[in-house]
Image (cartoon, grey):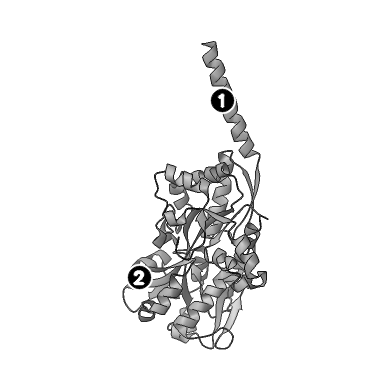
Amino acid sequence: MLKTLKTASIAVVASFIASAAIAQENLTSNTAGAGTTAGLTATALVEYANDRGIANIQLKDGQTGTNYIQALAEGKIDIANGPFILPFLLQRAAGPYASLGKEKGAEIGQNIQLLYPYTLSIFSMYAYDAKGVEGWQDLKGKKVLNGPPRGAATTNSRALIQLFGGAKAESDYESVTVSWNQVASAIIDGTADLAVIPVMLPGPRVTQAGAAGDMTMYSLPKEMFESEAAQKLLNKPGSVAYVIPAAQAAASLGDGWTVKSEDDMFRGMAVTGGDMVNKTMGEEMAYQLTKAHIENIETHKALAPFMATLNFGVLDPKVAGLCGPNPVKFHPGAVRAWEEAGQLVPECAKP
């Protein structure tokens, strides 16, 4: 009996020491604006990790993804979330990372690994009805809100406008850029005539702007949407083509909103991404963080009205934007957590 008790005591002490060793670790995390999909998910992970004694995560929100994804790759922070397009550009030293040089971009880009994927938002265009905008063909000569001064959102916005509206930034329309925290006010106060930015259905930005007057959200034009050029843009790393019934989109937005489409379907570009870590993170830590997320998914979906529609817990590459040209693979610890939970991790997304 004494021997049994002694063995049990040793096991309890060992377990406590192991948990304490993890809990004593301080991690740093960066995310985008508070109240967004990424912001809510980052804040939730802080709580999950703290509640379970996994780690103390120091979170900075309202940050620019372009900057903190590079910081993650360089090992300056431990956790970050954002669209998969940023690691893709980083590895190729393209776009906002061109100054790094291809050798350094390729070197540090491979340091990013995934804990769990999800849909961040859906790119669309919206404006007050009083602005007289009829569709994507009306952007020339307008003041168009593209997103923050620097980041993937603005790059995506301008690419969509050029393809679907035939207009180029600055030469055909005035490009308005503001911080994420100023987006709603830029539309409300007339700084911009319309917005082509990522939204949630519903989301805090569209809800705030919609409270100030009747608005319309415009589906991407069907014929162009189905073209080879559009499908290439819509399904590039960090995004997938997005189609839902227009009535569903309108219902989610609420009173005062109209969804305009040629038919009964709403078309947009879904931004895919996830919570990512530097690959130097220990296997056990990555496992525990991912497990905490997995076991809280249903609670997670209830954090905001739009969270249930953003594919948390879905690992299908066509939905999550995994594999193909997307260079981001799962962290080994994350693979263990997902497989332990009974999920099939795509082989092409394993490290």
Badge 2 marks a residue whose secondary structure is helix
Q: What residue is pinned by disc 1?
A: 12
Q: Is residue 281 visible?
A: yes
The answer to the question of whether label 2 and label 1 lie on touching residues, with beta carbons closer than 8 A, is no
Q: Residue at x 51, y 44 (%)?
A: 292
Query: Of residues 139 and 88, which is closer to you in this image?
Result: 88
Residue 246 locus on image (x, y percent) = 35, 70
User: Which is in the foreground here, disc 2 or disc 1?
Assistant: 1
- Tell me if 44 is positioned left or right of 344 in this view: right
Image quadrant in which you'd find residue 113 = bottom right
Mark 2 or 1 closer to N-term?
1
Dot 1 crowding, Cα within 10 Å, few <14, some 14–19, many 20+: few
Dot 2 crowding, Cα within 10 Å, few <14, some 14–19, many 20+: many
Q: Is residue 188 visible?
A: no
Query: Of residues 294 and 7, which is closer to you in this image?
Result: 7
- Tell me if 68 is positioned left or right of 228 in this view: right
Amino acid carrying label 2: it is: Ala
Q: Which mark is residue 246?
A: 2
Q: Residue at x 59, y 76 (%)?
A: 189
Residue 97 locus on image (x, y percent) = 63, 70
Residue 22 locus on image (x, y percent) = 61, 39
Amino acid carrying label 1: it is: Val
From this view, report whether residue 4 is shown above or below residue 304. Answer: above
Badge 1 marks a residue whose secondary structure is helix
What is the spatial separation of the Cα atoms under label 2 and label 1, in whole angstroms?
56 Å
